[in-house]
Image: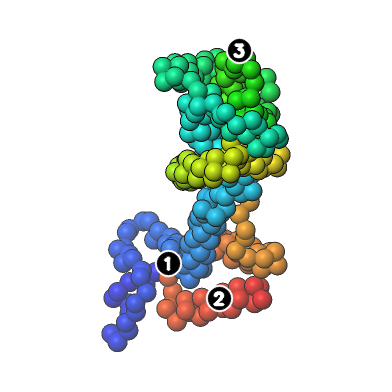
Amino acid sequence: LVRDDDLPPDYSSTASSPALAPVSGLPPPAYRSIEGSPRNSEADGNNMVTGQAEADFLEEQRGAREPGLSSAFTRQVIYNIVGFGILAYHTISAEQLLPVLFSMPESDTPPSLPFKFTGGFALPTKAIGGILAAQGFVQMIATMVVFPIVSRRLGSLATYRLVVLSYPLLYLAVPYLTLVPANWRMPAIWAVIVWKVTAQAFAFPSTNIMLANSAPSTKVLGTLNGVASSAASGCRAFGPTVSGILQSAGLSIGTLGLPWWTNALVAGCGALISLCMVEEKRRSLDDEKQCGTDEEQRPLPSALDANEMDAALVAAESLNASSESHVSTPGSPLLTRMSLDIRRGSLRDNKM
């Protein structure tokens, strides 16, 4: 080390060196510092770049895992939403047509089968009210007691197909019940009521379950439920209007079954769509978290290729070995600058 009183009067240096006070009987302590060296600065810079690259990669993976609005509407999701809308249309139309058919008077005109006939059941208002009240009770029992047992044994998709395939047969048969003998009419009416409300109790919960299972992620489940509810509400809005217009047109031409058979055609479209549906396993929140954890644990891409990494490691090891074995005191700033330039050049050659 050099003390201040040994330097020439015109010598100035910006090198940071601690002033060493003379200590009698003890050698000057060795001074060693690599902090702030160009090599460490470059290493810190590389570490910052690598850390930023890792953060960008993880953020990109998280963004890729987040299902967008377009990716949420898969083919199965669309099938379920369209089927839900069709189901809402023909069930609300039947709810409007059936009480009217109960109250219509019997026809004096002889029927001209298979399509030309009119007339209803001519039931009193009290009987119609009792039938509608019993309808709600039957549907409650079917939903709370029968549906869980059937769905657990058959599955949601099989239960849904079972009822939507039966709807066209129900709507085709209802108009012809007005032609049965009087003593068979009430049993026929109760058979229609039980069939209709049981089918509704099975169909709507099943389609809700299948829609939830077909969602690509639980994060978009609220959006899908909102779209499905909007589609069902829209179909319920114009279903009675269309069926009422068809009933008026059918009665004017002597065809009582026109709105019912049109309803059967719409229900048949829903039955065909059900054949394209696939029952999917429900994705729980724990499964999505586990999937995200597995993706985050994948190896991150390297900032350098293999050749550059090998060359950098060899250069770093050689420089570390030379710096660890060399303990020196601060010398001339010019010599220090020359040494740093030589080291930078050797590191650049190794990387190339």
The residue under label 2 is 344
Going by the image, does 104 lie left or right of 166?
left
Q: Secondary structure at mark 2?
A: helix
Q: CA distance from mark 2 to mark 1?
A: 14 Å
**Image quadrant where one finds the N terminus:** bottom left
Q: Are marks 2 and 1 in contact (CB under 8 Å)?
A: no
Q: Is residue 322 above or below residue 250?
A: below
Which residue corresponds to mark 1? Answer: 36
Dot 2 alpha-carbon crowd within 10 angstroms: few under 14, some 14 to 19, many 20 or more: some
Q: Nearer the viewer, residue 274 or 291?
A: 274
Q: Which tag is nearer the camera, tag 3 or tag 1?
A: 3
Q: Residues within 10 Å of mark 1 (few under 14, many from 20)?
A: few
Q: Could you tell me which secondary element the residue under label 1 belongs to? A: loop
Q: Amino acid at mark 1?
A: Gly
User: As rendered, which of 202 and 248 lies closer to the eye?
Assistant: 248
Q: Is residue 290 left or right of residue 99?
A: right
Q: Label 3 amino acid? A: Asn
Q: Which is more N-terminal, label 3 or label 2?
A: 3
First of labels 3, 1 by sequence position: 1
The disc label shown at residue 269, or none: none
Which residue is at the far top?
Answer: 183
Residue 325, above or below 176: below
